[in-house]
Amino acid sequence: MTSKIIGTGSYAPAQVVTNDDLAKIVDTSDEWIASRTGIRERRIAVDEGTTDMAVKAARRAIDNAGVEVSEIDVIVLATTTADNCCPAGACQVQAELGADKAVAFDLVAACSGFLFGLNVVNAFIQTGVYRTALVIGSDHLSKIVDWSDRGTCVLFGDGAGAAVIQASETGIKHMVMGSDGMKGSILSCVARTGGNFLNGKTPELGYLQMNGQEVFKFAVKKVPECVTQILDESGINIEEIKYFILHQANFRIVEAAAKRLHQPIDKFPMNMDKYGNTSAASVPILLDELNQEGKLKRGDKLVLAGFGAGMTWGAALMEW
Ligand code: ACO
C-alpha cells in the first residue's frame, strides 16, 4: 500500500505586481530581475492571508479529487507565514472547510514544506493510520519581505497549492527529505523576539534575510543530489521520468539541475515568470497547472523536488 495524489488545486491573489512596478520602489529593472531569476511578475495578497489562500486552493483540490470533505482524515498546512501563532492555520482551514473528522496541524519547512507534508501523510497512509489527506502549501511572503531591500523583495510572491492524497496500490514510490540546520543563517526570518516583562523589551518582528549566492550554491548542489538519490534507491532510470517539478525559485537553478542530471530542459516545466517564488506553494501550484492543462496522464512518472530555508530539501518520486 502507498498513497496517490487524486486531486490538485491552487490559488493566486488577483493583484499582479510586475518588475516595472518594483522598479518604482527600489533601484532595480525588469532586465536585471528577469535575466537573473526568470521572474517577470508576481501576485501579492492585499486583503487576504495565508489561510484564505489555503482554503481556496484546498476547495479546488477537493473538487478535483471528487471526495467529500468528511472523508478527509488529516490536513497538513505547510507554511512559514501562518496568519497567527495559534490556532494553527491548518485548524482554521479545517474550520472553513467543515472537515470535522480530520486532525489538522501546520508544518514549517519553508519552500520544502509541501514535500515534507507529502512525506508525512504518505507515512501515515502507508502504515494504515489514515486513508485520505489534504496537504496544502500556502505562503504570504509579501508580509515578511523588506520592501526596501532589492536583493530579496523582487524574488517572492504569494499563493497556495493543495493536493488530496489517498491510499492506493500505486502512486508515491519513494520520498526523501533532509535538513542542515548548520546552514540555517543563510536564509532566515527572525520571528517575535526578545520581549517579556523582565527585560522590558518590546517584541520585534524581523524581515527575510538571505545570502543569495550561498542559497544558490546550496540549491544547485542539493536538488540534483536528492533527485539522484530517490532514483538510485528506487532503481528507476532517469529517462523514464516525464517531468521534474522543481521548486520555482530561479530559472538558473532549474537549468543547473537539468544540466547536472543530463536531462533536457523541456522536462522541467517552469512558471516563476508569473508567480515569483511562492515558497511552500510553488511545487503544488506548478503541479496543479500541469494537471489542469491535461499534461499529466495516469502512469506518468514524476519527480517533485525542492529546497528552502532551514536549510531543508526534499524529493518525491511518483507514478501519476
Ligand atoms: N536589481 C538590481 N541589482 C541588484 C538587485 C536587484 N533587484 N539585487 C541585487 N542587485 C545587485 C547587487 O547589489 C550587486 O551589486 P554590486 O555588484 O554593485 O554589489 C549585483 O546586483 C550582483 O548581486 P549578486 O547577489 O551577486 O547577484 P546574483 O547574480 O547572485 O543574483 C540572486 C542574486 C538572484 C538573489 C541569486 O543569488 C539567487 O537567485 N539566489 C538564490 C535565491 C533563492 O533561491 N532564494 C529562495 C530560497 S527558497 C526559500 O526558502 C525562501
Image (tube, rainbow, N blue to C red):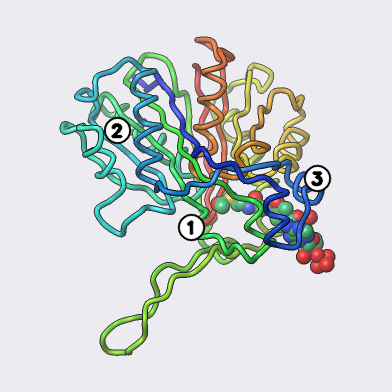
Which residue is under mark 3?
35
Label drawn at residue 143: 1
Residue 64, by quadrant, is top left
User: Percent from the top left, x then y, of residue 12?
Assistant: 50, 36
Q: Circle 2 — which element?
A: helix
Disc 3 within 8 angstroms of ligand 1 (CB): no
In the picture, measured across the screen, residue 1 lies left or right of residue 190, that is left
Give the residue displayed 45% in from the left and 50% down from the top: 109
| Separation of marks 2 and 3 at Cα, in angstroms | 42 Å
Q: What is the C-alpha distance between the residues marked 1 and 2?
A: 33 Å
Query: Element under label 1?
Result: helix
| Three-letter amino acid code of the residue under disc 2 | Phe
Q: What percent of the width, then of the height, locates residue 42?
A: 61, 43
- Label 3 is placed on what type of residue? Ser
The earlier-in-sequence mark between 3 and 1 is 3
Q: Is mark 3 on a helix, strand or loop?
A: helix
Given residues 169 and 148, the one toward you in this image is 148
| Residue annotated with mark 2 | 124
Mark 2–mark 3 CB contact (< 8 Å): no
